[in-house]
Image: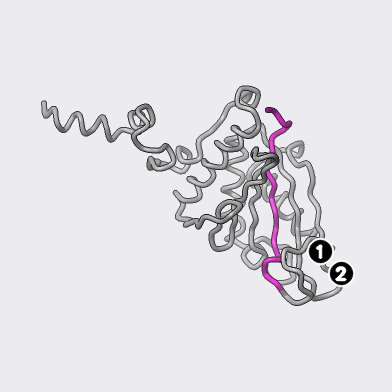
């Protein structure tokens, strides 16, 4: 037996690396998207508490996106990639919710509420995470920028949030009880305070929280 090769194989194994702490868990490559995402069983929320539960989900979602080819950049509030952001919503320095923002220019054709193939791909990743972390629920908000009539923009923003919900329900079997709020806000919640066309204001927001807050 080649002892040197055997020792090398043991040190290279993921289980050994996690056990010894010689390589951070986030840096250990996954063999599949499911392995990257991870999972928690029912009852884990009471054992872990909300901040830890969502921390594990946040890291898993990040790794799952990266496994599929997404390259994130670090931002002050989380992670950013072309077309999608993954943010941390904290209260008293404790993780309370995750926020996934899908760029409006990526999610929908101009003036329509029909999801693009790219949007469906992103929503599929979010759905996988909801399945893997069952003690979570979601809030969905649709947003537009200011040009156009407020009435038509409000209607469009509501239709877009409903389109995301229906994709999660029909294509991924996320049950109705997990949707806490699904609504549209036109330009009432601007990121950039402008009356002109602004891509940051055109967005769909998906908030992921736990079924109850546990500390």
Write the residue at 52% across / 47% down. 62
Magenta highlight on residue 210: yes
Q: Residues within 10 Å of mark 1 (few under 14, many from 20)?
A: many
Q: Position of residue 104 (x, y in %)?
A: 67, 64
Disc 2: which residue: 150
Q: Secondary structure at mark 1?
A: loop
* Residue at the limit of the structure toward the front, as seen here: 92
Write the residue at 66% across / 60% down. 115
Write the residue at 79% across / 59% down. 159
Up the image or down, 194 lies above or below 52; here it is below
The reply to whether discs 2 and 1 touch (Cβ–Cβ < 8 Å) is: yes
Residue 40 position by quadrant: top right
User: 10 and 158: which one is in front?
Assistant: 10
User: Which numbered disc flags the more N-terminal residue, 2 or 1?
Assistant: 2
Q: Position of residue 65 (x, y in %)?
A: 50, 50
Q: Secondary structure at mark 2?
A: helix
Residue 66, disc: none
Q: Position of residue 148 (x, y in %)?
A: 82, 75
Q: CA distance from mark 2 to mark 1?
A: 7 Å
Write the residue at 46% across / 52% down. 68
Q: Position of residue 24 (x, y in %)?
A: 40, 38
Magenta highlight on residue 134: no
Q: How many numbered discs, if any?
A: 2
User: 122 and 94: which one is in front?
Assistant: 94
Magenta segment, which residues?
198-215
Disc 1: which residue: 186
Can you say which quadrant of the picture contains the N terminus?
top left
């Amino acid at each position: 037996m080649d002892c040197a090769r055997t020792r090398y194989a043991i040190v290279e194994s993921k289980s050994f690396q996690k056990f010894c702490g010689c390589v951070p868990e986030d840096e250990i490559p996954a063999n599949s998207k499911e392995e990257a995402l991870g999972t928690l069983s029912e009852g884990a929320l009471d054992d872990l508490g909300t901040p830890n539960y969502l921390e594990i989900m946040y890291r898993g979602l990040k790794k799952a996106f990266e496994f599929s080819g997404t390259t994130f950049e670090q931002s002050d509030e989380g992670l950013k990639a072309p077309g999608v952001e993954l943010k941390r919503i904290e209260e008293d320095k404790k993780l309370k919710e995750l926020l996934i923002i899908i760029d409006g220019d990526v999610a929908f054709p101009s003036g329509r509420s029909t999801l693009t193939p790219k949007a469906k791909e992103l929503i599929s990743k979010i759905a996988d995470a909801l399945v893997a972390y069952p003690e979570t629920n979601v809030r969905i908000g649709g947003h537009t920028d200011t040009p156009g009539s407020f009435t038509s923009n409000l209607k469009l923003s509501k239709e877009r949030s409903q389109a995301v919900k229906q994709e999660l329900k029909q294509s991924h079997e996320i049950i109705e009880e997990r949707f806490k709020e699904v609504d549209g806000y036109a330009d009432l919640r601007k990121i950039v305070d402008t009356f002109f066309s602004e891509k940051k204001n055109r967005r769909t927001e998906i908030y992921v929280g736990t079924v109850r807050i546990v500390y």
